[in-house]
Amino acid sequence: MIGYGGDWNPEQWPEETWAEDVALMREAGVNQVSVGIFSWSLVEPVEGRYEFGWLDRVMDLLAAGGVRAFMATPTAAPPPWFGRTYPEALPVDADGRVLFHGSRQGFCPSSPVYRDKALAIVERIGERYRDHPALAMWHVHNEYGCHNSRCYCDASAAAFRGWLVARYGTLDALNEAWGTAFWSQRYSDWGQILPPRATPSFHNPGQQLDFRRFSSDALLDLYRAERDLLAGLAPQVPATTNLMAGAHWDMDYWSFAREVDVVSNDHYLIGKDPHIDLAFAADLSRSLGRGRPWLLMEHSTSAVNWQGVNRAKRPGELRRNSVQHLARGADAIMFFQWRASRAGAEKWHSAMLPHAGTGTKVWREVVGLGGLLKDAAEVAGSTVTSDVAILLDYGSVWAQDHPAQPTTLHKPVEVIKSWHAELWKLGVTCDVVHPESDLSGYRLVLVPALYLVTDHGATNLERFVADGGTVLAGPYSGIADEHDRIRLGGYPGAWRDLLGVTVEEFFPLEEGESVELAGGGIGAVWSELAHATTATVLDTYVTGEPAWTRNEWEGGAAHYLTTLLAGADLARVLGAVCAEAGVPVSATPGVEMVRRAHADGRGYLFVINHSGADVVVAATGVGLSDGDPVDGELTVPAGEVRIVRETR
Ligand code: GAL
């Protein structure tokens, strides 16, 4: 079964609508919904007084309707009584501003009283629903850190110090790691250490990096506490929390992914090529779960309400987006939210059941998608295999976030996404992996922007190349160690030998400035004075300095770019390294083709035509929805999708 549904928030509606909701869910093919996500103030209207009657009736209706419930813990939105009674638990920003209740996520992640109150309601919910026939999964919290990923209050300061003691053991070790001889920052007592609150000038980079790590860990710790409590009450029920992978960069999702029973992710269209950004988020979600099927917990049927100008989806876009996620490994397609709100801050957010009701484009598409997903039931459990991996480390992104860099125009997430986007256009599906993970299954590893790399990560990449792999690295990668201290002796210190290159100085480019390559391309944002030591120079700036190099290293080879390329220039280099690594490239403009397969070899080809013209692609098998044979060629009409059960 492919899961289908969304967040159901019946508490926003008179009870008369609830039965109609469940009937319409059945009409649309909805088989699972998340409930109770923002219900704390209704379940516990007054501290210590719980009112479950309404939620019992919601769960009973779902059970009777055959719709599975992902029961949420409501801890992402503490009620007004919480903020009034425990003002010390409210989040505080770097400028010392207290953020009051009246919205959501109004709590400090390190607050002991928040933790107590959250666990108290989680325990009640766990006890009450652990054996309910509708219960299929615990949906713990909602989007940890969405609005409160870092808190700078005194409780956070104390927790940060505790985290630092555990990490460094001694103040000497911390002083050494942070380089506190600089600007007279040497600490002589743990109590002197603060979160990076507003200061006259730049923060210590080690302090800011460790605070980002601590803040992510503080949220993860809250997840673990809720999950463990629920697991104790209902060991048979899996737990997840919905991530925002690909869109949100404040949490280290590699650590979150290790703690969930199944990865679930939320994605909203954004950017110039939103469907390509979607593909990145989906590839990352799959990779976070080490390739296992994952759940798309939220996306939108049409417009969101938080982007200023909120573009409605064009006819067919909902279907294409959903099938993209499915193709890239999702075993559930869900939306925020089931019924569009009448009131509240998200009343202008699209939903499965729009304000205008069932006589609408959105509803017709929702019902159509339910049919498609039913036909695709046999896809569930199959996986995607990639020859190519892109390295991603949250710590590296955070370290580079420090404002005192050679240039602030080099934005690692944008660079990573731009490489992924060009691969998408080349028809190459890739994984996104942590630098210390097992790379042996890949032919090609890309390192678009990895400023900080641990010693383990550095040797891991060397071993991959030694064993016959191909690497392409971008500039400003392999520069710093895990404490954000420069690796000395010529850049990029971690991989000078591997790349056969040493860089003596960076020459960042102003906005609009560029370097011309002798081979015809244009580099932007970054240039550098590099010398090939053992590498062969494949292209230079017209002024003669190396632009693209290739170094043979034991069984494999490592390529290096000294500037940022984009579009066709980047595609040319990516195409060359794919060819060298034996990675097939097959591009039909605007057409996305991805494969999933079961361990026993049953495979599926997903073809998503994002273009405005009909296309013909190579495929052999049987159409999943219509059962029609596909004999070598498949026509996919403009804007349409096809899934083929392959016989090859
Ligand atoms: C998500 C959130 C939902 C809803 C949605 C709107 O971040 O989990 O509750 O706010 O965004 O796009």
Image: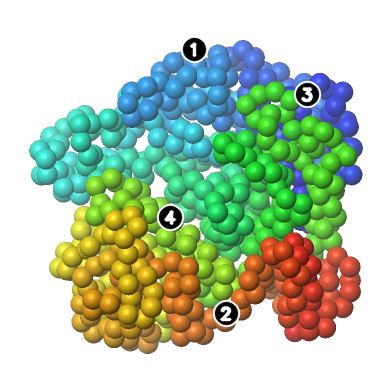
Q: Is mark 3 within 8 Å of ligand 1?
A: no
Which marked residue is nearer to the observer: mark 1 or mark 3? 3
Q: Please say which color scheme the image uses.
A: rainbow
Q: Residue 500: x and y, percent?
A: 25, 79
Left or right placement of residue 22 versus residue 494 in this view? right
- Report the quarter where the N terminus lies: bottom right
Q: Amino acid at mark 2?
A: Val
Where disc 3 sits, the SS reads loop
Q: Which residue is mark 3?
A: 13
**Relative to 132, 559 lies left or right:** left
Residue 232 in view: no
Disc 1, SS: helix
Q: Is residue 409 left or right of residue 4?
A: left
Q: Amino acid at mark 4?
A: Val
Query: What residue is rendered at 32% in x and 72% in y?
Result: 516
Distance from Cα at disc 4 to Cα at disc 3? 40 Å
User: To which residue does mark 4 refer?
Assistant: 413
Tell me where residue 152 appears, x and y as whole percent. Answer: 34, 29
Q: Nearer the viewer, mark 3 or mark 2?
A: 2
The circle drawn on residue 338 is none
Quick check: is the Cβ at mark 1 less than 8 Å away from ligand 1?
no
**Among the two numbered marks 1 and 4 on one chain, the one whose residue lies closer to the N terminus:** 1
Q: Is residue 293 above or below residue 539?
A: above
Whether residue 456 is situated above or below residue 401 in the rendered picture: below
Q: Residue tagged by mark 2?
A: 585
* Disc on the earlier residue, 4 or 3: 3
Look at 74% across and 61% down and name the residue there.
639
